[in-house]
Image (cartoon, rainbow, N blue to C red):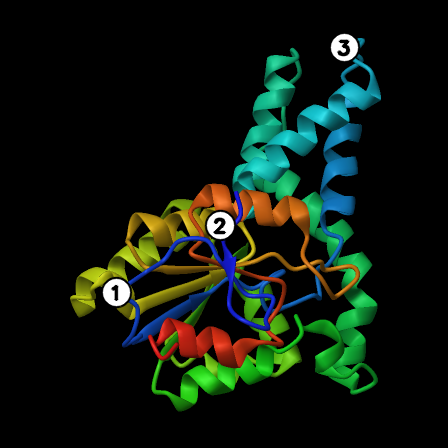
Amino acid sequence: MTGRWLPDTQIEIIRERPDRGGIRFAVFDFDGTISLIREGWQQIMIPMMVETLVSLRTGETEEALRTAVTDFVDRLTGQQTIYQMIQLAEEVRKRGGTPLAPLAYKRIYHDCLLARIADRLKGLKGGTIPPADLVVTGSFDLLENLRNRGVTLFLASGTDEAYVKDEAGALGVSKYFNGGIYGALDQHEKFSKRMLIADLFRRHGLRGHEMAVFGDGYVEIENAREADGLAVGVASDEARRCGVDAWKRGRLIQAGADLIVPDHREQGPVVAYLFGET
């Protein structure tokens, strides 16, 4: 599916929204939408899960297991990490094994991931890595623009809340999220992006065009579409830091994105469009 592009930009309009304008609230995903601290997390999670399944000695090839794991990891990306671990436990059980508790799998994954990103966090906190090196390009300008227009901003992530707050602080973006910073909880049923978006609509009596949701994952875009909010799909190529990730773009369109952007370097036209000014 192909939309139209705003003139002289890389902003792709997938679904025309004649009701756009008057945004009061914006909800942002974190990893891949604002932050690049965890870039490459799939390279930690997928091998860890494949190793777990290989150890069951079912006779399946490592390639077949990698395909199966990649499928459910991709499908659940954007939800809280625990849901991927719940699925891993189910895959172990289906193969006759006795799984660990999903929280135990999540802690193993987090230990491995935190080892990978330790130098990034140390550099940010110590001042040797500029925050601009580990955010999606244009993020600061976008957040500043929306705040200057009086939009209340929320950060909502599938990553554990304590980590999200720490990493947002290291990047220097916490100050923009005057609505709050939310993330996964050990009692995972107490938080989801869907719950946050629905609660905002209910408490503030919002109409669809008064809420914008920015994200690079299927889940938050689907949640925005369900609420009839304005959904901005961020098809960021996290490794190259430029251009559109074709796989993300396809998934975001499938989820119901109204716009597709590669990053936030053209945030001015995006915000003007969402406010009905173009």
**Quick one: SS at disc 3?**
loop
Which mark identifies residue 186? 2
* Marks 2 and 3 close (CB-CB < 8 Å): no
| Mark 1 or 2, nearer chain start | 1
Foreground pick, 84 / 202: 202
| Mark 2 or 3, nearer chain start | 3
- Image quadrant assignment for residue 167: bottom right
Which amino acid type corresponds to the residue marked 1 in the rendered image? Asp
The location of residue 194, given as percent across then percent down, is 35, 51
Per the image, the residue denoted by label 1 is: 19
Is residue 121 shown to the viewer in this render?
Answer: yes
Is residue 191 shown to the viewer in this render?
Answer: no
Name of the residue lying farthest toward the bottom: 148
Which amino acid type corresponds to the residue marked 2 in the rendered image? Asp
What's the CA distance linking mark 1 and mark 2?
38 Å
* Dot in front, 1 or 2: 1
The location of residue 134, given as percent across then percent down, is 72, 73
* Residue beneath the point at 59% across and 27% down: 89
Which amino acid type corresponds to the residue marked 3 in the rendered image? Thr
Q: Residues within 10 Å of mark 2 (few under 14, many from 20)?
A: few
**Quick one: SS at disc 2?**
loop
* Residue beneath the point at 42% across and 79% down: 272
Per the image, the residue denoted by label 3 is: 58
* Residue beneath the point at 82% across and 16% down: 61
Foreground pick, 29 / 170: 29
What's the CA distance linking mark 3 and mark 1?
54 Å
* Residue beneath the point at 74% across and 58% down: 114
Left or right position of 174 against 202: right
- Image quadrant assignment for residue 118: bottom right
